[in-house]
Amino acid sequence: MEINLSYDQLNNEYSMLMGVLGASVSKHLIDEHLTCIWANSYYYELIGYTKAAYETRFQNQCDRYFETNPEGWKLLTEKIESSLAKGEKGYSVYLPMVYPDGSKFWIKLQAVFTDEYIGGYRVAYTTMIDVTDMMQAQKEQMRAQQNYETMTNDA
């Protein structure tokens, strides 16, 4: 039995699978904007914008998305530049992010640089996962450790 699925059907199934896994997948130009060429539906769900709203508001340019989060943009661009300068195949970075309502969350972003170029710019594939719970647990653990050290130093 042969099953032939259209591109849209395959894309929808792939997006659904990545959503179930809690993974955003996207394709970006390594240009000054980190322009998003393609993203699965979970990418938009994770950052809190619909695809249409993201395209309209930010024109698929990540630097515009990060205007309310300069710390995150600086961490990301420094990591990309460092990885490229070292000839690495990609990078991994934890970033603070900001939802449209101003609340904060954390992601782990992993990317692989490809040999593909579009318009003279190198292409990278990225995955993002929400690691807010992990980061909050780490902060709580650090606070507990500091409290313990303070208590034992005072004793």
Image: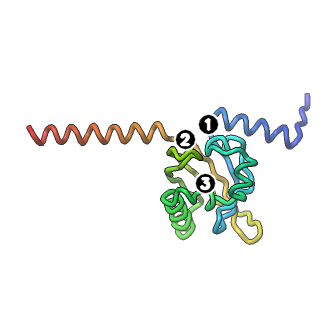
Q: CA distance from mark 3 to mark 2?
A: 15 Å
Q: Secondary structure at mark 1?
A: loop
Q: Which residue is mark 3?
A: 111
Quick check: marks 1 and 2 in contact, CB under 8 Å? yes
Q: Amino acid at mark 1?
A: Gly
- Of badges 3 and 1, the one in the foreground is 1
User: Which quarter of the picture shows residue 116?
Assistant: bottom right
Q: Amino acid at mark 3?
A: Ala
Task: Return the x and y of residue 10 as percentages of the image width and height.
Answer: 82, 39
Q: Which residue is mark 1?
A: 22
Residue drawn 63% across the image and 40% down it = 23
Sooner in the amino-acid sequence: mark 3 or mark 1: 1
Q: Which mark is residue 130?
A: 2
Residue drawn 64% across the image and 60% down it = 113
Judge whether 80 appears above or below 111 on screen. below
Q: Amino acid at mark 2?
A: Asp
Task: Return the x and y of residue 92 as percentages of the image width and height.
Answer: 53, 53
Sooner in the amino-acid sequence: mark 3 or mark 2: 3
Judge whether 116 appears above or below 48 on screen. below
Q: Secondary structure at mark 3?
A: strand
Task: Return the x and y of residue 80 as percentages of the image width and height.
Answer: 56, 63
